[in-house]
Amino acid sequence: MLLDISRALRAPGEDIFFEHSDCIPPQDIFGEEITFSDVVLKGSFSMAGESLHIRGVLTAVAHALCAGCLKPVAHEMEVEFDEIFTRISRYPQQEEAQDEEDDERLEFEGSKVDLAHLALTLAVLELPMRFTCGEECEVLSEIQPDEQNTHACQKDMPDQHPFSALQQLLTKDQEV
């Protein structure tokens, strides 16, 4: 689905508010399929020269399986964004020079902007390292070490940091 920016092209510098629903296809991330639902971008956009400034918030729900018990998990996300899209030049000479400058810039052509790549990037970067169903996950609670299972050295010196022994060696023997 494309965002119509024709109002911004007619009124440069004016903020125009938008609400854009999008669809992110399922993503295979480290062998796990993650799906997305309720993907909505809200915010405002404005034109400044050949650049389109879009800012707002992406909200979405990511669906995956718990890393412990494999039950379905839904992870709600809300990500702020502030991006600049550059208009693609119709003149080939200028376009070649622009391609050499930056391969990863966001671009648009005409009066519509495709926000699918932006939505995908924001959503994937906001994913947790692993999905868990929370504190109530029986499998993960069995795996987690108890606070009672601490090492003897941690019990003797609970208020000291792990490198305090090295610090003591340096203070005892100043000729290092």
Image (tube, rainbow, N blue to C red):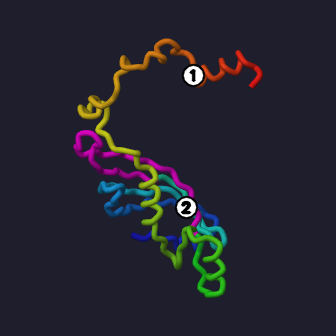
In the rendered structure, find residue 40 and report the number of the disc placed on it: none
Give the residue drawn at x 59%, y 64%.
84
Judging depth in this view, the residue of 134 and 69 nearest the camera is: 69
Residue 159, image x, y percentages: 55, 15
Q: Give me the C-alpha separation between circle 1 and circle 2.
A: 46 Å
Farthest residue toward the right?
175
Q: Is residue 10 visible?
A: no
* Residue 102, quarter of the rendered image: bottom right
In the rendered structure, find residue 54 and report the number of the disc placed on it: 2
Q: Earlier in the sequence, mark 1 or mark 2?
A: 2
Task: Give the main secondary structure, helix, strand or loop, of the magenta stretch.
Answer: strand
Judging depth in this view, the residue of 121 and 171 nearest the camera is: 171
Give the residue drawn at x 27%, y 47%.
65
Report which residue position mark 1 lands on: 161
Q: Is residue 118 above or below residue 113?
A: above
Q: Are marks 1 and 2 in contact (CB under 8 Å)?
A: no
Q: Is residue 66 visible?
A: yes
Q: Is residue 15 above or below residue 154?
A: below
For mark 1, does the 10 Å Cα neighbourhood hold few (<14), some (14 to 19), or many (20 or more) residues? few
Residue 162, image x, y percentages: 55, 24
Give, as a single range, the part of the protein colored magenta: 58-85
Give the residue drawn at x 51%, y 15%.
158
